[in-house]
């Protein structure tokens, strides 16, 4: 299992020799040169990500320190763009923090709050004000101030005093510096967008995938099932374009979903039975009957939450019957995926047939450069570059657009209700004890992605890109509001600059929880260690053990929200 973890779960690259010689390279590999330090000197080695479980050539693990940035595209275009964004934003906020130094010096100096006595060292230079005095206020109401900032005299209740901050934080220089910080961030992000677009092209050109050679036709004739028909049409009408592969996608989402359900439940049964147990229907039925016979009342209740063999078998039976019925139906063609021999052929076809959704919807034949050759059975085709093959969600590929919009609207409403509930809980905790509100916010930030993933799994998406976009929207909205907006709303304006339980203390606690706490949780990987060291040795079979060594699931959208929530928090409270 540990060998599986090292050679299947962890990424490896083909090792080309050592400091003095090179090992043979597999034919057809697309090698890239990069500097890689060794003990004696700097040696140039080739980075070529090895196939999962590669055994024919020497491989080694990627180094977390010396892997070049350009090689991060080996994990996918999105991963490369993420780290490019992260590096650029780090530079932008470094410049913004340097520009903020004059404000930090001013707040910690004698002119603002007499060098901020009694303020903790890590908060000196913030806008905390300790220079206060009681002043009379004629029109102040008790409901507008917390109890520690309003009082009355002992002689008459009509005269009210409030605690006033004497610090002058609203200076022109401070304001201009804050505007300058905002300008650096805005301009930096605009520049970053151009850099990311360039990096996207570089990562895409550096990694050759099936997407670079393929097209997808979204509106094929419903009865065009024959791959040879498509192959001959492209060959005859595009100067001998050679079709290497043709995949006909049909409207059989229900059949694919039933097949997936059956396979998943069979896998769960396999994990629960002893190694070597036959998985034929009679044997599984016998095991299910024996398990159900032994159950008591408590076991039946537990089975409703954690299904056993009888529950999985019933799902297999239902799925099998559904498969048998759906397999007898005729299915219309819904998508056609064409893979060409060369990139040049793919680009030539895209340039000729890409006419836009509006022209396709109206079947405007005049936009085609050569209508006689570029019409397929009299139809203007909707042609575009497809998603990566590994990101296509075949069981939801043909879900109607209206259904998808309804599902996304419903899940977004549930997300909004959940955010409101979280806000109410944070507000109640903040009123009870300010010290625990930051911890409460951090806990919800960590746990909310699980709810967002469950809601997103209820939606139909044609590709994993759509799943990530939907998940990012939910998690980002929740974390932005939970981290920055809620704290501003629930805090009394008059207590923002207090030393003991002011807003700055709360913001520091949030920063510490989000930056330090979350990072430590990811580095410790407690769930991964529990799976590998405790659950794996107790697995029933090798397949189940390998599954426990498959690593922790992660989502790129969640990584983006982890990054952006800290940036939003920094920008939101930059002035204090």
Image (cartoon, rainbow, N blue to C red):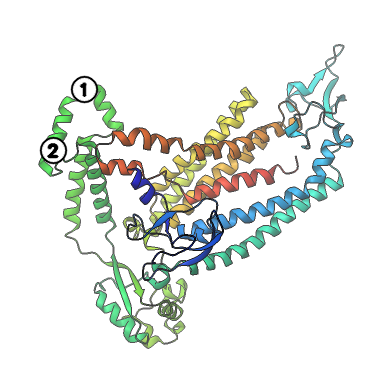
Say which residue appears at 11% left-offset and 39% top-offset: 283
Q: Which residue is mark 1?
A: 296
Residue lying at the far left of the rendered structure: 282
Bin the neighbour count of mark 1 within 10 Å (Cα to Cα): few under 14, some 14-19, many 20 and up.
few
Q: Residue at x 79, y 26 (%)?
A: 118
* 73 over 516 or under it: above or below: below
Q: Is residue 21 above or below residue 67?
A: below
Q: Position of residue 420 (x, y in %)?
A: 54, 37
The answer to whether marks 1 and 2 mark residues whose Cβ atoms lie closer than 8 Å is no
Q: Is residue 221 positioned above or below 174 on the image?
A: below
Q: Residue lying furthest right in this view?
A: 111
Q: Quadrant of residue 125?
A: top right
| 303 and 110: which is toward the camera | 110
Q: If the image is split into quadrants, where does the C terminus sit?
A: top right
Q: Position of residue 383 (x, y in %)?
A: 40, 73
Q: Is residue 421 visible?
A: no
Task: For mark 2, give the secondary structure.
Answer: helix
Please name whichever residue, 277 or 251, is drawn nearer the observer in this view of the structure. Answer: 277
Left or right: 92 in relation to 210: right
On residue 233, the disc is: none
Rendered image quadrant of residue 253: bottom left
Circle 2 residue: 285
Say if residue 211 shows up in the picture. Answer: yes
- The CA distance from mark 1 to mark 2 is 19 Å
In the structure shown, which secondary structural element does the residue marked by tag 1 occupy? loop
Q: Nearer the N terminus, badge 1 or badge 2?
A: 2
**Left or right of 330, for residue 101:** right
Work out whether residue 3 or residue 366 is closer to the camera in this orientation and state it: 3
Q: Quadrant of the N terminus?
A: top left
């Amino acid at each position: 299992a540990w060998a599986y973890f090292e050679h299947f779960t962890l990424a490896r690259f083909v090792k080309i020799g050592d400091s003095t010689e090179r090992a043979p390279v597999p034919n057809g590999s697309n090698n890239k040169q990069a500097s890689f330090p060794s003990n004696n000197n700097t040696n140039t080695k080739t980075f070529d990500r090895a196939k999962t479980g590669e055994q024919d050539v020497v491989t080694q693990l990627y180094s977390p320190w010396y892997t070049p940035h350009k090689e991060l595209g080996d994990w996918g275009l999105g991963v490369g763009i993420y780290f490019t964004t992260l590096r650029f934003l780090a530079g932008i906020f470094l410049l913004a923090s340097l520009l903020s130094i004059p404000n930090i010096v001013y707040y910690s100096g004698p002119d603002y709050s007499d060098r901020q006595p009694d303020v903790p060292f890590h908060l000196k230079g913030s806008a905390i004000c300790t220079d206060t005095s009681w002043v009379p206020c004629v029109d102040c109401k008790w409901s507008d101030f917390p109890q520690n900032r309003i009082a009355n005299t002992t002689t008459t209740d009509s005269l009210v005093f409030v605690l006033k901050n004497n610090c002058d934080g609203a200076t022109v220089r401070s304001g201009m510096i804050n505007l300058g910080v905002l300008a650096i961030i805005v301009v930096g992000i605009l520049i970053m967008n151009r850099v990311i677009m360039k990096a996207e092209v570089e990562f895409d050109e550096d990694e050759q995938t099936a997407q670079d050679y393929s097209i997808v036709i979204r509106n094929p004739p419903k009865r065009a099932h024959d791959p040879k028909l498509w192959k001959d049409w492209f060959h005859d009408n595009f100067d001998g374009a050679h079709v290497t592969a043709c995949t006909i996608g049909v409207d059989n989402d229900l059949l694919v979903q039933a097949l997936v359900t059956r396979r998943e439940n069979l896998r769960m049964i396999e994990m629960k039975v002893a190694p070597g147990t036959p998985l034929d229907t009679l044997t599984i039925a016998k095991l299910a009957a024996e398990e159900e016979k032994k159950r008591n009342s408590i076991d039946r209740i537990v089975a409703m939450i954690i299904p056993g063999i009888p529950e999985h078998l019933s799902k297999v039976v239902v799925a099998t019957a559904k498969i048998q019925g759906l397999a007898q139906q005729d299915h219309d063609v819904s998508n056609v995926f064409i893979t060409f021999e060369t990139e040049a052929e793919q680009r030539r076809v895209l340039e000729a047939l890409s006419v836009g959704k509006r022209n396709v919807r109206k079947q405007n034949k005049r936009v085609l450069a050569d209508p006689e050759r570029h019409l397929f059975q009299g139809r203007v085709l909707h042609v575009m570059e497809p998603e990566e093959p590994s990101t296509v969600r075949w069981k939801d590929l043909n879900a109607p657009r209206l259904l998808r919009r309804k599902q996304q609207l419903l899940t977004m409403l549930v997300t909004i209700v959940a955010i409101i509930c979280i806000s109410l809980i944070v507000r109640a905790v903040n009123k009870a004890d300010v010290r625990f509100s930051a911890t409460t916010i951090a806990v919800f930030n960590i746990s909310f992605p699980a709810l967002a993933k469950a809601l997103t799994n209820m939606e139909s998406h044609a590709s994993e890109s759509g799943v990530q976009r939907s998940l990012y929207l939910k998690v980002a909205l929740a974390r932005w509001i939970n981290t920055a907006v809620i704290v501003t709303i629930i805090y009394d304006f008059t207590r923002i600059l207090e030393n003991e339980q002011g807003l700055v203390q709360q913001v520091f606690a949030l920063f510490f929880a989000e930056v330090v706490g979350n990072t430590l949780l990811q580095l410790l990987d407690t769930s991964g260690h529990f799976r590998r060291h405790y659950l794996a040795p107790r697995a029933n079979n090798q397949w189940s053990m390998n599954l426990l060594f498959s690593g922790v699931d992660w989502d790129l959208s969640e990584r983006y929200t982890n990054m952006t929530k800290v940036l939003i928090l920094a920008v939101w409270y930059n002035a204090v």
